[in-house]
């Protein structure tokens, strides 16, 4: 299984947008993403997002880790 390491917050947001999420607003240093029928996501806009945090947001969005990593490339 691929690992979720060395992924910036901005790249993570771009990947979630490919899955239909919209960047609604930024609160502090967190991007708030929404998609109808799905829970809202809060992604920190850091140089590197902690893998456990990113994994929990991907799981919350109902996306497989493999599909998410494919969209990062």
Image: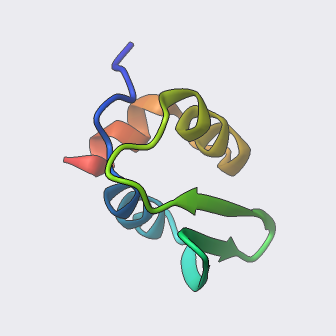
Looking at the picture, how far across and down is residue 46, in whole percent? 41, 55
Tell me the residue at 32%/51% (across/down): 47
Vertical position of residue 44 compared to residue 14: above or below: above
**Farthest residue toward the top?**
1
Say how the picture is coloured.
Answer: rainbow
- Which residue is at the front of the view, 51 or 20? 51
Looking at the picture, how far across and down is residue 26, in whole percent? 58, 81
Vertical position of residue 73 compared to residue 36: above or below: above
Tell me the residue at 57%/33% (across/down): 55
**Farthest residue toward the front?**
28
Classify the position of the N terminus by image quarter.
top left
Relative horizontal placement of residue 12, taking residue 23 as reference (left or right): left
Tell me the residue at 34%/38% (across/down): 69
Tell me the residue at 57%/43% (across/down): 63
**Farthest residue toward the left?**
73
Vertical position of residue 50 compared to residue 63: above or below: above
Quadrant of res 30: bottom right
Looking at the picture, how far across and down is residue 62, in whole percent? 67, 44
**Farthest residue toward the bottom?**
25
Relative horizontal placement of residue 70, taking residue 61 as reference (left or right): left
Disc tally is 0
Looking at the picture, how far across and down is residue 19, in whole percent? 48, 62
């Amino acid at each position: 299984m691929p690992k979720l390491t060395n992924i910036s917050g901005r790249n993570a947001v771009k990947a979630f947008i490919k899955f239909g999420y919209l960047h609604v607003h930024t609160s502090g240093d967190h991007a708030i993403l929404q998609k109808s029928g799905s829970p809202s996501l809060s992604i920190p806009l850091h140089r590197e997002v902690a893998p456990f945090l990113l994994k929990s947001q991907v799981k919350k969005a109902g996306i497989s880790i493999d599909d998410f990593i494919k969209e990062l490339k």
